[in-house]
Image (tube, grey):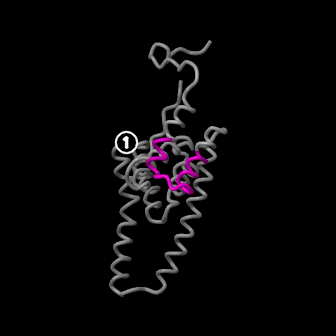
Amino acid sequence: MSARPQRISLAAMLSAFGAIGLTSFGGGRSAYFRHAVVTTRHWLTDSQFLEGLTLAQILPGPNVSNLSVYLGQRLRGLRGALLAISAVLLPGAGMILLLAILYFGHDTLPQASAVFKGVGAAAVGLAFATTLQVGRAGVRGWRDLAIAALTFVAVAFLHVSLIVALLVMAPVGVWLNRPRGPLPDPSPATAGRSRP
C-alpha cells in the first residue's frame, strides 16, 4: 500500500512563496523556486519541477507567473495557485511602484544605471545556474542533448523565432521520447493486484 501524499499547509506555502516574492529577482527566479520546493522542502521532485518549468516557458505570459500557478496548483489546488501567485507577485509589484515613485520623483538617479547593470549580471548568473541544475534532470541521453543543442543554435545564432523553434522541436522531442512497448494497464481491476 502506497503512502498518502504529503499535504502542504497554506501557511507553509505562504512562507515559501512569500520569501521568493521578497528576495528573488531577474531571469533566475526559477532557481529560487527549485531551491524552495525541491532542494529545501522536498515538496516536489526534480522531474515534477521540470514539468512545471517546461509548461511555464512554452505557455503565454511571464514564466514566473506561470510557474507560480503550476507549483501552487500542484501543491494545494486552486487555493494554492492563487496563494502562490499572489505571494510571488505582490511584493515585487509594491516595490517597483515605490521605486518608480522615488525614481521619477527625483528626476534621474546617477547610481541607478550601475545598480541595474549589477543586478542584470547576477540575474544572468542565476539563470545559467538554474539551466545547469535543471538540465541535469531533464537532459538524459544523446537525443535530449541534440534537441537542446539544435534549439539553442536555432534561437541564439540563427535568430529563429522562439515559437517556430518550439513548434518544430517539441514534436520531435515528444516523438523521440515516446513510450516504447505496451503501456501498463491502469484499470482498477489490475491496480490492486500484488506482484507474485
- Look at label 1 and name its amino acid: Gly
Residue shown at the point (53%, 19%) measured from the top left: 184
Left or right: residue 38 versus residue 89 is right
Residue located 45% across and 47% down the image: 164
Q: In the image, is residue 165 part of the stretch drawn in magenta?
A: yes
User: Which residue appears at 40% of the width and 47% of the height?
Assistant: 59
Side of 124 where 70 appears, left or right? left
Count up the numbered dots. 1
What main secondary structure does the magenta stretch of the protein show?
helix
Q: Secondary structure at mark 1?
A: helix
| Residue 45 x/y as whole percent | 55, 42
Quarter residue 145 falls in: top right
Q: Which residues are magenta?
A: 148-168
> Quarter holding the C terminus?
top right
Q: Position of residue 6 (x, y in %)?
A: 48, 39
Q: Is residue 114 magenta?
A: no
- Viewer-proximal residue among 17 and 12: 17
Residue matched to label 1: 77
100 is higher (above) or lower (below) than 73 = below
Residue 7, how many percent across, how many down? 45, 41
The extreme front residue here reads 158
Q: Compared with residue 52, is residue 112 higher up or lower down, i.e. above or below?
A: below
